[in-house]
Amino acid sequence: MSITNIDVTLRDGGYRNGFTFPDGYAGEHARLSVKAGFDWVEIAYRNGSFNPAISRGMTGLGPNDYIAEIADIIGAEHIGLILHPANITSGDLQECYTAGARLVRMCLSVTDPGPGLRYVSEAREMGFAVCVNFTRASRLDARSLVDLSSRSAESGANAIYLADSNGSMQPGEVSRRVTLVQDVSGLDVGFHAHNNLGLALANSLAAAHAGAAWMDSSILGMGKGSGNLISEQWIAHLERHHSDPGVFDLGALLDLSAHLRDSVPESTPVLPHTDLLLGRFDLSVEHSDRVSADRRSQVHVARELGRLAVA
Amino acid sequence: MSITNIDVTLRDGGYRNGFTFPDGYAGEHARLSVKAGFDWVEIAYRNGSFNPAISRGMTGLGPNDYIAEIADIIGAEHIGLILHPANITSGDLQECYTAGARLVRMCLSVTDPGPGLRYVSEAREMGFAVCVNFTRASRLDARSLVDLSSRSAESGANAIYLADSNGSMQPGEVSRRVTLVQDVSGLDVGFHAHNNLGLALANSLAAAHAGAAWMDSSILGMGKGSGNLISEQWIAHLERHHSDPGVFDLGALLDLSAHLRDSVPESTPVLPHTDLLLGRFDLSVEHSDRVSADRRSQVHVARELGRLAVA
């Protein structure tokens, strides 16, 4: 099992702390991350997330000097950014490359994939490694998956990522979708887990067993809501069962984990009830506000919203 | 999938707070636990854990009046205790039954299973439901498992539990061992997870798919070290995929979760590095002290101890 590992802490963890880490934190994080064995460090969005208004901090904006600063420490060959097509221009792609990024991941709009796929082609021509990310993969039916996978392959992407944004997917479902996307596209497949139902690790194992070759994780699981696949656990698994000696450095990984824990209070592992319910009823974070403080009504509202979302 | 669920929070969680919960906590916990859909609430050890010196609090000792107090609230048919044969007498079994317990789980000594198995037979005759718990199941080879499983069946046990005490087992391994024990004994099999490597849920799912019919979990995962299977996630899974309406009450479950969180500071979810390494190298908690504060040396020492433990 050979996995390309992306550390998404600085980016997805940004949802917990307004995309603002302490001065100097990101550089030291990136250094330890590469030392621990990560292939790529996803250091930021560029010009904001899906909702640019809530992602104004450094790891939400990914400006050129920030990219250059981190690339000086770990080398461009480890620097990745994630992009929403609506937030960027071709000029941004070029600037990111010049500043020192070598991986971009394009979040694809299911209803309007054209612009994202054109950027994919452009980024490949510039020399980037390029992943296409299908967000809210739990809500994509098989026909959409097939269509988007084919078009992603035609656009020149290196890999397709399934993102379980709602944290609602089950291992068997993950396995079937990874297989489908792989079959249709002929590309490497990646998986991005959310831990709403505690299934981040079980789903990532299922993805890997189905042949997924790229995996996202974050230190302490620091990511939106319940967080992501926990790097410490995932890397310990790979180190024990699937790697040659020296590929991973558990000491550096635990140093990184302690550094994050001690530097960023928002990294504390959490089990939020709202996110558990969002996962249970396959709802996205946009529904968080509708789920009220009283737990009995939370369950009721989530159930009703889940029905509406399926209908 | 029909699972008998045991809530082990009060007992295994006791390792976090000296087996001492706030006054009145256990009763309210038990009430909400049964309301949420648990079949059994394991309210205590009797006369201490494997190491009686560290388990002197109420849920470490399980005295008669405590059993009777909780039985008054939820009924004897939901009250369980776990027992180390070295700590009890036949008189204890009788007293527990009289006070209002109806399930006992016997931790079996691999090197000297005789006394435990004699108590199993006695407890069945008294009218208890009886589980035999194989602790440190990761360290039992197939021949020991076969031998202990046959003898447990002959002694009249209702079910055999595999306890992943070191939190080191993998899903495939869990699946194979559940199948083996089931085949040999013809009994129901249960699984008790520890979350050192984050695999508590993945392993429990594997156990259930292999046919395990009993499952332990604890609220917020509150248990020794990294804790147990997290009830909130496990019950959400069962409620969503494997139960008739009304079997589980997610509202009561989240009430219970909030009640524990607000009443018991030690219930906070944690990701201790020492326990991660114990799991990675399949070591028991007795080795915790040997794993020093420096992470690089931690990894080294754990690796060496792991080699010694295997040899």
Image (cartoon, coloured by chain):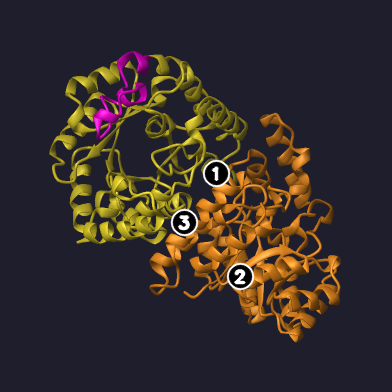
Chain colours: A orange, B yellow
Please tell me in which quadrant of the rendered image residue B35 appears.
top right
Q: Viewer-nearest of labels 3 and 1?
A: 3
Q: Which residue is mark 3?
A: A254
* x, y percent for residue B198: 47, 52
Q: Which residue is mark 1?
A: B233
Residue nearer the viewer, B198 or B109: B198
Does A88 appear above or below A222? below
Amino acid identity at mark 2? Ile
Q: Provide the secondary structure element on which disc 3 rests.
A: helix
The CA span between labels 2 and 3 is 20 Å
Q: What range is drawn magenta here? A: B46-68
Can residue A233 be seen here? no
The CA span between labels 3 and 1 is 26 Å
Q: Chain of mark 3?
A: A
Q: Which residue is mark 2?
A: A73
Q: Quadrant of the C terminus of chain B?
A: bottom left
Does A239 appear above or below B103? below
Q: Judge from the rendering whether residue B266 lies leftward or rightward of residue A109; answer left or right.
A: left
